[in-house]
Image (tube, coloured by chain):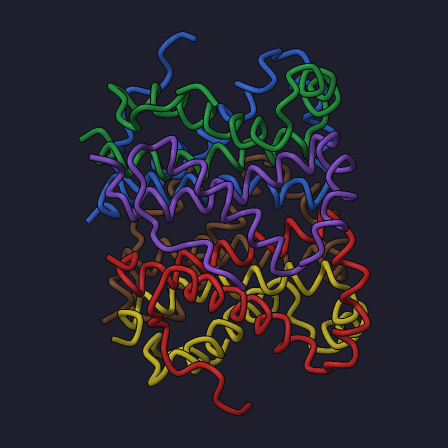
Chain colours: A brown, B yellow, C red, D purple, E green, F blue
C-alpha cells in the first residue's frame, strides 16, 4: 500500500482528531480494500445511531494514541 | 471544518468531562456531517438503554485522554 | 449544568470505584437529560445480562482514569 | 455499601486477575443490586459465547488497572 | 483455583501474545467454569465472524497489559 | 505455532499500523485456526459495516500498543 502515514505529530489537537479519524477509516480499508464496497456500505451505517457510536469509539481509541504522541499538545 | 478544538486543557474535571462529550459527538459528526440526519437519529437512541451505554463508553474513552492531558487536575 | 465533579481524588479505592460509577451515569445523563426517561429505561436493562455487562465496561474504563488520578491509592 | 475494596495491591498476578473479576462483578452489582435478579440472569449469559466474551472484556479492562497498580508484579 | 499465572514476564513478544490469549480465555473460564459447556459453545462462535472479532478485542486489551509489563520487549 | 512475531519495533508509523492489523488477525487465528473457515467468513463480515468497524476497533487497540513500543516514532 502506498505511503499514507509518515508521522503521528500534528500541529493542533483538532488536526490530531482528524488524524484519528483517518486511522479509524484505514482500519476499515485494510479489511475491505474495495472503495466501491465501502461506499455502498456508507449510507447504511451513517444513518444508524449505533453504527455511528461504534465508529466514534474507534476514533476515541485512536485519539488516545495521537494525543499521547503529541504530549497532549502542551 | 472550522476550528472547534484548540486545546485539551480545561479548568476543572467537570469541564474536562464536558469536553469528552464534545469529542464523542464530533466523532459522530465527522462520519455523519448532516445535522439534520443526526437530529433525526437522536430520539431513537436517546431512549434506548444500550445505545446510551455505548455513547457513555465513548465519553469514558475520551475522558481518559482529557484527564491525562490535564494531569488529572492535580 | 450544576457542579457535580470538582475532583478525581478519593480517599479509598472503593470510593474511586463509586466515582467511576457516577461518571458512567453522567455520560448517559448528558445524552439523555430527562431523569424520567432514564428511570423508564432502567428496569429494561437492569434485568438484561448483556446490558449490565456493557454498563460494567463503562465503569471499568472510568475506573482506569480515577485509579491513575489517585496513583492507585498508594 | 459495606467495604469491599480496601486496596488494589495483590501478592501475585493471579490474585490480581481474581481482583479484576471481582471489580467486573461489582460493576454489575452497583447497577443491579438484587442478588436474586443477578442469579436469575447468570445461566442465560453463562451459556452464551458472546456474553462470556463481553464479560471477559470487562475483566481485561480492570486487569490493566490492577496490573498497573502492582507495577506488573515486578 | 490452582495456580495458573505466576508472572506476566515472557521471553518474546509472541509468547506475550500467547499469554494474552490465555488471559482472555481465563476471563471466560472464571464466569463459566464448566469445560464441557465451554466446549459446547466453541463451534458456535468459532464460525461467527463477529464473535471472533470480539474475542480478538479481548486479546488486544490483555496484550496491552502484557506488553507494558515487558517494557515492550526492548 | 511457528514464529510470527519477533519484535514490536517498526521503522515507520505506517508499518506499525500494519503490524497492528497483523496482531488483530492473529487474535482471530488463535481462536479459529482453520484458514479455510476464516476465508469462508471473510466475505460475510467484509461487506458488513458494523463488522468492519469492530475489526477497526481491534486494530486501534493494538495500535496503541505498537505506537507505545515505538515511542510514537519520535
Residue drawn at (81%, 60%), measured in percent from left and top?
A: C44
Residue E23, position as x, y percentages in the image: 46, 28
Q: Residue furthest front?
A: D2
Query: E23 and B69: which one is in front?
Result: E23
Q: Position of residue F64 (x, y in %)?
A: 37, 45
Using the image, determine if residue A23 lies above or below residue C19.
above
Nearer the observer, A8 or D34:
D34
Along the horizontal axis of the image, is F21 left or right of C71?
Answer: right
Does residue B25 appear left or right of residue F69 in this picture?
right
Closest to the observer, A32 or A34:
A32
Question: Where is C47 relative to B9, above or below?
Answer: above
Q: Quadrant of the C terminus of chain B?
A: bottom left
Q: Residue placed farthest to the bottom in the image?
A: C2
Residue A56 position, x and y percent, is 57, 59
Residue A50's place in the image compared with D70, above or below, is below
Q: Position of residue F22 (x, y in %)?
A: 45, 28
- Looking at the image, residue C15 lies above or below residue E25: below
Amino acid at each position: 500500500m502506498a505511503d499514507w502515514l509518515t508521522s503521528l505529530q500534528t500541529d493542533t489537537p483538532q488536526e490530531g482528531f482528524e488524524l484519528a479519524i483517518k486511522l479509524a477509516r484505514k482500519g476499515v480499508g485494510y479489511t475491505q480494500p474495495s472503495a466501491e464496497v465501502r461506499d455502498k456500505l456508507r449510507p447504511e451505517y451513517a444513518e444508524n445511531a449505533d453504527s455511528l457510536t461504534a465508529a466514534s469509539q474507534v476514533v476515541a481509541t485512536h485519539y488516545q494514541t495521537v494525543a499521547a504522541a503529541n504530549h497532549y499538545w502542551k
